[in-house]
Image (cartoon, grey):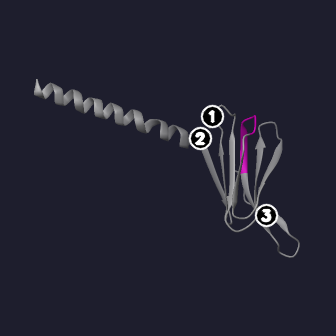
Amino acid sequence: MKRTAALVTATAVLTLGTGLTTPAFASTAAITTVRYGSTEAQLDNNPGNGAASWIWVWNPVKPAAVDYEDYNGNVHRLYVDAGHAATTQPPVDIWRIRACQYETNGIGYYFCGNWS
């Protein structure tokens, strides 16, 4: 009887442990992270809150932006001031994003990394 109880307890712990860790992997698998300079941006096409997608951008020292393109070819840009973060929830799935940051370089312009 003692051996059966130990086996049932071990099985329950293993089952609970698996059940608790699986959703974390599922949710992070949908996230794409891109960086350019000190800018970081993320895309999640399965945010779990009912929205089609979720986009976030942050830069600790410079104004920044994230460009995002949907599957219909529409490109949008989300801006953020230095030291701040911003999010948006487009009503459609997003195909790709790229991180950008403002550089003065004499003319002042947003330079961007590659699309991902």
Q: What type is the residue that disc 3 sits on?
A: Phe
Please name the residue shown 33% across and 31% down the image.
15
For the residues bearing labels 2 and 3, Cβ distance under 8 angstroms: no
Q: Quadrant of residue 113?
A: bottom right
| Numbered circle sitting on residue 86 | none
Mark 2 or mark 3, earlier in chain: 2
Could you say which disc has been placed on residue 111 in the image?
3
Does 10 sit above or below residue 65?
Answer: above
Image vertical order of residue 27 relative to residue 101, above or below: above
Q: Residues within 10 Å of mark 1 (few under 14, many from 20)?
A: few
The residue carrying mark 2 is 30
Distance from Cα at disc 2 to Cα at disc 1: 13 Å
Circle 2 packing at 10 Å, graded few (<14), some (14-19), many (20+), is few
Q: Which residues are magenta?
A: 90-97
The answer to which image quadrant residue 52 occupies is top right
State how far apart marks 1 and 3 are (Cα): 32 Å
Instruction: Please state which amino acid type lies under the numbered disc 1.
Output: Asn
Q: Is residue 115 visible?
A: no
Secondary structure at badge 1 equals loop
Left or right: 32 in relation to 74? left
Q: Position of residue 60 (x, y in %)?
A: 67, 65
Give the structural element (helix, strand or loop) at label 3: strand
**Residue at the left extreme, as displayed:** 1
User: Does 97 sit above or below residue 92?
Assistant: below
Q: What percent of the width, then of the height, locates residue 2?
A: 11, 27
Does 104 appear in magenta? no
